[in-house]
Image (cartoon, rainbow, N blue to C red):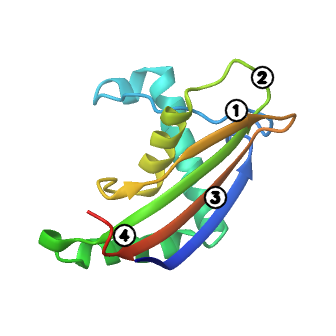
Amino acid sequence: MNRVTMHTHFGFAGNGQDPKGNAIPYYRITQRSKFKDPGAKRYAAWKEFVGWVAIETKAMPIIRKIEKAVEEAPEFERKIKVDVDIIFSKDNHNHADPDNVKKGIHDALFVDDKYIMGMVDFHYGKDPRVDVYISLVEGSNLR
């Protein structure tokens, strides 16, 4: 039987650069590209924006408690996971791959995403928005 022991949620409109902009997908960054590549700089700004929204909405302290609980669980019998569900809307049919948006949000919020599970879903709407639901799930059905 699995149970949720901690939970938080936050959401925001836009992407930090544009209040009506779509979510920014994962972008592979190298040591060199992070200083020169405009795509890498845009992705770094997106991650910083997501982190600040989590702080401002009071979600980040709960996220850090969830990370600590995962770190402290015995690794050889770890029956604990972080469930991250992401729902985002976008304003047009030129959009990022949903899995890459999810990866970018994971990168922004978690130091280690090894124990993260969850889903990502999207729909089209006039006002681009991202909602993130994070839960610590413990139970015997997790491996």
Placement of 139 over or under 16, stated as above or below: below
Crowding at dot 2, Cα within 10 Å, few <14 / some 14-19 / many 20+, comes out as few
Nearest to the eye among marks 2 and 1: give it. Answer: 2
- Is residue 54 left or right of 106 when viewed as pictured? right
Q: Label 3 near label 2: C-beta < 8 Å?
A: no
State the separation of the CA atoms marked 1 and 3.
16 Å
Extreme residue toward the bottom, this view: 5
Would you call the spot at circle 1 few (<14 residues within 10 Å), some (14-19), or many (20 or more)?
many
For the residues labelled 4 and 3, the Cα–Cα distance comes to 18 Å
Instruction: Give the mark nearest the N terminus, 2 or 4.
Output: 4
Q: Which percent across, then down, holds residue 41?
A: 49, 30
Q: Which residue is mark 3?
A: 53
- Please say if the residues under marks 2 and 1 sit with CB atoms less than 8 Å apart: yes
Crowding near the residue tagged with mark 3, few <14, some 14–19, many ≥20 C-alpha atoms within 10 Å? some
Give the residue pinned by disc 2: 92
Q: Secondary structure at mark 2?
A: loop
**Among numbered discs 1 and 3, the one appearing first in the sequence:** 1
Figure check: 98 above or below 3: above
Q: Which is nearer the N-term, disc 2 or disc 1? A: 1
| Mark found first going from the N terminus, 4 or 3 | 3
The residue positioned 50% from the left and 23% from the top of the image is 39
Residue 140 x/y as whole percent: 30, 75
- Residue 67 marker: 4
Under mark 3, the amino acid is Val
Q: Looking at the picture, tell me which residue is in the foreground, 122 or 9.
A: 122
Residue type at the position of mark 4: Glu
Q: Nearer the viewer, residue 36 or 50?
A: 50
Q: From the viewer's perspective, is the residue at label 2 or at label 3 nearer?
A: 2
Residue assigned mark 1: 22
